[in-house]
Image: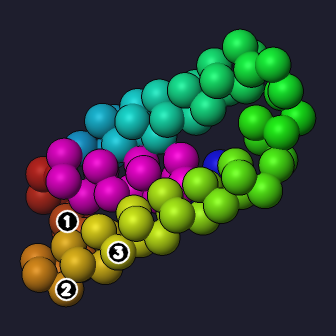
Amino acid sequence: MTAAALLAVVVASRWTPAVGAAAGMAGWLLVLAGWRVSDQPAAWLTGPGAQTAYAAVTAGLLVLLVRRIAREGWVLPGPGEPA
């Protein structure tokens, strides 16, 4: 779930919050779809390989977000300004 939330933030920092939310939701739905069709559903979500993959994806997304903030800053629109 952390990776899905971070995916939403990274995408929202590039496009709009709605697109970010949709990307995070889509990422999580892909995980659930994989779990649903897996022969070993418990291992799909909680196994060591899955946890390693989630950690790697989260770390990669965090690096992307930090680079973006370092390059462009993190500026939130003021009241009355478009997002």
- Mark 2, residues whose alpha carbon is within 10 Å: few (<14), some, or many (≥20)? few
The mark that comes first in sequence, 2 or 1, is: 2
Question: In terms of secondary structure, where does tag 3 sit?
Answer: helix
Amino acid type at mark 2: Ala
Q: Which numbered dot is residue 68?
A: none
Give whichever of discs 3 and 2 has the lower sequence position: 3
- Residue drawn at x 81%, y 19% is 39
Residue at numbered disc 2: 70
Circle nearer the viewer, 1 or 3: 3
Q: Residue at label 1?
A: 77
Q: Which residue appears at 47% of the width and 28% of the height?
A: 26
Q: Report whether 47 appears left or right of 57.
A: right
The x and y percentages for residue 61 are 39, 63
Q: Which residues are magenta?
A: 3-15
Q: Is residue 44 visible?
A: yes
Disc with the residue nearer the chain's start (1 vs 3)? 3
Report the colour scheme. Answer: rainbow
Please identify the residue farthest to the top as the structure is shown: 37
Mark closer to the observer (3, 2): 3
Residue 38 in the image, given as x and y percentages of width and height:
74, 20
| Residue 65 included in the magenta stretch of the image | no
Q: Which residue is mark 3?
A: 63
| For the residues bearing labels 2 and 1, Cβ distance under 8 angstroms | no
What separation in Å lies between label 1 and label 3 (alpha carbons)? 24 Å
Provide residue 29's location: percent of width, then percent of height: 58, 25
Task: Residue at 31% x, 79% y: name it.
Answer: 66
